[in-house]
Image (cartoon, rainbow, N blue to C red):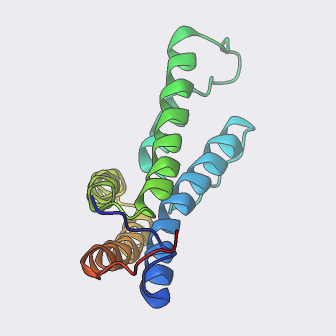
Amino acid sequence: MSNVTTTNIDPAIAARLASGANWFYWIAGLSLVNALAHSFGSNWSFALGLGITQVLTAMIIPEAGEAAGTIPAILGWILMVALIGLFAFFGWVSRKPSLVVFVIGMSLFALDGAIFIFASDWLGVGLHVLALYFLWQGFVAAREALREPVAPTRA
């Protein structure tokens, strides 16, 4: 990978790149809010968050009268936090820019959208498609940034 940073590329490209990468942060953040809301007994969630974290939350939140803190529940929380952290990591690395991270992140998010299809949650499907569109725009900007000649830096 060349020595490309958002400080030495066209500002318009850098803005589009950052905007696309920020969608990874939104996905991670809303997924975290969803998990915390469900853990405190709320029935609402953001459809833009990860579907897999909603499935994990439904599996690990004990029903009334059941014991909390079982090994499967702890492992579920660890997995959920790791997935949320992974998407936050994608947001950070994709700004470098990284085409590979954009592709991996978009692929995982598209697979996650299948959960909403199986659940017939069409709002969730639509928001996944919308997020994928903006992530794609970030990918295109990253590709342009990597193609653009890098301005010489001063020592």
Tell me residue 138's x, y (percent): 38, 74
User: Residue 125, percent across and down?
Assistant: 37, 66
Q: Nearer the viewer, residue 15 or 81?
A: 15
Name the one closer to the observer, 149 or 64: 149
Q: Residue at x 41, y 78 (%)?
A: 152
Res. 17 image quadrant = bottom left
Quick one: quadrant of the N terminus? bottom left
Residue at the location (42% across, 81% down)? 9
Residue at 40 percent across and 77 percent down: it is 134
Image coords of residue 91 (percent x, y): 48, 58
Percent across and percent down for residue 79 are 47, 28
Among all residues in the image, which is located at the extreme front? Answer: 155
Residue farthest right in this picture? 40
| Whether residue 57 is situated above or below residue 125 in the rendered picture | above
Q: Is residue 113 left or right of residue 71?
A: left
Residue 86 or 17: which is nearer the viewer? 17
30 w.r.t. 8: above or below: above
